Structures are given as C-alpha cells and as structure tokens.
C-alpha cells in the first residue's frame, strides 16, 4: 500500500513537472511576456496623465519669489523715501531756527542802535577818552573848594599854608549856577579832592529840599563822569541863627537828606553842622558874625575838622 501511494505521488509530481515545463517552453517562445505587456500598458497609461498641478506649483513658487523680491524692493524704496523726508524736515527746521535767530539778532541790533543814538551822550565818551591822558597829569594834590559866600570868605591859603588849594566860589552861587558853570568852577582845575558846600542860597530863594538834593546829585555825577579819580567831600550846610526866614529845623532836615545822598553815591559826608550848632539848633554866636556868616573862630573850627580829610 505504501508503495502504491509513493508511486501515485511520483506520477502526480511528474505530471506537474511536465506541465510546468510545457508552459515555460511556450512562454519562452512568445516575443513579450505577460509581465512586460502589463508594464507597457502601465507606461502607456501615464502618457495622458494630468500633471498640470505641477506646473501650477512651479508658477506659484515663481510668483511668490517675484513677490518677495518686489516686497524687498518696495520696502527699501519706502525706507529711502522716509529717510529722505526726515532729512528734508531736519534741514527745514534748521533753516527755520537760523532764520529766527537772524531775525532776533537784527531786531536786537536795531533796538540797541535806536537806544544808543537817542539816549547815549557821546560827549561823555570824548571826555572820558581825554581822562586817561589827563589823569596822569595829576601829580600833586590839588584841592578845590566850591560853594557860596561862606566858602568865598574862607581864607584857604591862611589855614592851609603850602597846600595847593583853589577857592572856586561866589557870593550868590547856588546849585543851578554850579551846574551851568561846571567846567569853569570845577573841571578846569583838575582836582584831586573837591570840597562842596552849597545850598544855603537855594533855601533863601525858596527852592525845595528835593530840588536842592537833585541838583547836588547832578553836580556829583558830573564830577564822577569828568574827573572820576577825584575824591568828593560834601559838607553839611552850616547852621544859622533864625534869619531871612531860614530856620535851624529846615537846615537839619536838608542835611539828613544830603547824608543819605552821600551814602547812595558812595562819597564822603562831612558833618560840620553838629560842631557849630548850639543846644537850640542855632549857629553858636562865637562862630558867627551876623547869624549867617562865619567868624574867624568859626573858620578855625571848620579847618580843624577838614584837615584830617585833606591830609588823609
């Protein structure tokens, strides 16, 4: 039984082999195998394949690249235009500032020119230019006494022997007269020190205290302008015995104002009034001739006070 089975199996196997060999022989005899035909058919099917989407992708990519390039160009162009506009605005602002400064300078110069020629006294400039040379000419002390009759009667050479003293005074001199004749009374003597006693005639003429003070201030300022190196001494108005309507109280109040003026003008105030007045506010009789003018003893007393200012 076993042998029969084996034989049957062999016969089956042999029959299968022959079939396979026959089939293989037939295939070799054909020019194209079934596989080749199938492959060719597959290749033929790709000939009409729709690949338009590939072109679309390429075109889209190119467009995106061009757009990107255009965007960069436009951005650079915009940046350049923006920078140029900023530079232009900066230049315009700078020009505006320069123009404004130029206008302000021109206006200031115009105002200064108008003020200078309308208010500036050019004669003072000429005087001050001469002062530089004239100042060197003052070698010795030169004392000028300016005032009214009280000063006129003051024997300066007697009391200030061997000193260069000048008595530049007159009987009816008042503050207005000294201002009008300043050059002849003060300037031409080129004084190193000036002793000013003035005001009693102004009081007799009814001039107000304020006017007297203003006039004396004008005299002081003219001295400073024309002879700035000169030392100025303003004497107090001397007391009187009530005469010609002049009271001791009037003189005392005026002297207070003159002392204040000296402080403001930074000049020396010499208080002779307190050394000649009695307890009633009148000129001491021993220092007086007629209640107004000074006696020899009075001038001796005045000299003792003034000596320290002359010698210092």
Image (tube, rainbow, N blue to C red):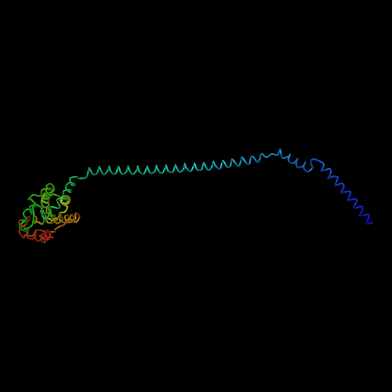
Q: Is residue 34 above or below residue 186?
A: above
Q: Foreground: 244 or 267?
A: 267
So how many labels did they put on this image?
Answer: 0
Q: State the quadrant of the N terminus.
A: bottom right
Q: Is residue 111 above or below residue 275?
A: above
Residue 77 place in picture, x, y as percent = 49, 41
Residue farthest toward the right in the current orientation of the protein? 1
Q: State the quadrant of the C terminus.
A: bottom left
Residue 266 place in picture, x, y as percent = 19, 56
Residue 92 place in picture, x, y as percent = 39, 42
Q: Foreground: 6 or 90?
A: 6
Residue 141 place in picture, x, y as percent = 11, 56
Q: Quadrant of residue 257?
A: bottom left
Q: Foreground: 25 or 215?
A: 25
Q: Quadrant of residue 96?
A: top left
């Amino acid at each position: 039984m076993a042998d029969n089975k084996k034989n049957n199996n062999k016969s089956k196997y042999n029959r299968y082999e022959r079939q396979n060999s026959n089939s293989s022989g037939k295939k070799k005899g054909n020019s194209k195998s079934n596989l080749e035909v199938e492959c060719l058919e597959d290749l033929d099917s790709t000939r009409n394949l729709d690949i338009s989407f590939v072109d679309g992708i390429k075109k889209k990519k190119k467009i995106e690249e061009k757009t990107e390039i255009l965007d960069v160009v436009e951005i650079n162009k915009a940046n350049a235009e923006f920078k140029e506009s900023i530079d232009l605005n900066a230049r315009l602002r700078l020009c505006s500032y320069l123009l404004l400064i130029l206008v302000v300078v021109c206006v200031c110069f115009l105002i200064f020119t108008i003020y200078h020629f309308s208010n500036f006294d050019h004669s003072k400039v000429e005087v001050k230019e001469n002062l530089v040379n004239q100042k060197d000419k003052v070698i010795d002390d030169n004392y000028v006494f300016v005032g009214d009759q009280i000063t006129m009667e003051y024997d300066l050479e007697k009391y200030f022997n061997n000193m260069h003293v000048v008595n530049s005074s007159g009987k009816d001199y008042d503050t207005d007269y000294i201002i009008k004749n300043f050059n002849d009374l003060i300037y031409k003597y080129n004084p190193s020190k000036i002793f000013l006693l003035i005001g009693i005639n102004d009081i007799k003429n009814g001039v107000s205290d304020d006017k007297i003070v203003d006039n004396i201030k004008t005299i002081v300022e003219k001295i400073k302008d024309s002879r700035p190196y000169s030392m100025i001494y303003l004497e107090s108005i001397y007391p009187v015995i009530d005469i010609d309507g002049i009271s001791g109280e009037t003189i005392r109040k005026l002297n207070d104002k003159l002392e204040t003026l000296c402080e403001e003008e930074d000049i020396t105030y010499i208080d002779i009034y307190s050394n000649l007045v009695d307890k009633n506010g009148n000129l001491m009789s021993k220092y007086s001739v007629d209640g107004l003018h000074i006696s020899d003893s009075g001038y001796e007393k005045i000299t003792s006070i003034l000596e320290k200012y002359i010698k210092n």
